[in-house]
Amino acid sequence: MSLLLPHAACAAPKEKPKDPLEVFRRIGKQEAYHNDRMQALLDVPEGYQRVAPKRNPDIRYQFAIRHLKARFEVRIHFMPAAKEPESPSEAWGDMLRGAMGSHGPMRYLPFPADAVKKEFGADWGYVSTPFELTGEHPFNAGYKLGQITVLHRRGVGKMARIVLTDGIEGFKYDRPIFYSARFDGADPPKPGLR
């Protein structure tokens, strides 16, 4: 009696295919990544590092960068195209903010159409004013302030850029990386020129 199993039974288990929203390929020698499914380019500038997303029940995000010294983090959340509004809608930003446990005062500031196309490669987008966070919420990781930028490209989907920091002065760390997440074809201003 042979104890050898057929070849198929001995084969290593197949790995679960990766979600295309979580596949990033490195571009060139710089610290830059591309997500083909979302046609998105993500830079990690000097003074920042890419960190692994943490799983949480409320907001799934696919990419994150953190300042090396300050408590400042940017998380990127993708939502592929589905039945979505072709015109600007604040509903997605409201849903994200609510999932973060924030309900304080805040408003959205839309980007001019020509600027959002040129600088982010998007068809429309907006940025929120900073808002307070509840520190006990799992997504917030103890951060005290948040800000959401939503960018939409027709036929591709939406990208949310979620900034987390401890105080209003923390937003100074956002200036050099404001355009670090954008769609293909964008031509953002150089740092320090906006």
Image (cartoon, rainbow, N blue to C red):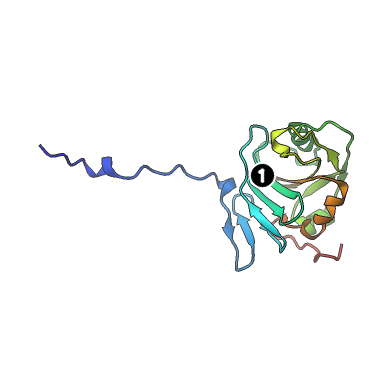
What residue is rendered at 76% in x and 55% in y? 120
Task: Give coordinates of residue 42: x percent, y percent.
Answer: 67, 56
Task: Give coordinates of residue 96: x percent, y percent.
Answer: 74, 36
Q: Quadrant of residue 142?
A: top right
What residue is rendered at 65% in x and 54% in y? 50
Task: Give coordinates of residue 80: x percent, y percent.
Answer: 64, 42
Location of the N terminus (image quadrant)? top left
Task: Give coordinates of residue 143: x percent, y percent.
Answer: 77, 41
- Among all residues in the image, which is located at the extreme bottom? 29
Q: Can residue 84 be spotted in the picture? A: no
- Identify which residue, 146 or 90, lies in the foreground: 146
- Identify which residue, 113 or 177, lies in the foreground: 177
Q: Can residue 85 be spotted in the picture? A: yes
Kind of residue sitting beneath label 1: Phe
Q: Secondary structure at mark 1?
A: strand
Location of the C terminus (image quadrant)? bottom right
Q: Which residue is mark 1?
A: 78
Q: Dot 1 surroundings within 10 Å: few (below 14), some, or many (20 or more)?
A: many
Q: Quadrant of residue 184?
A: bottom right
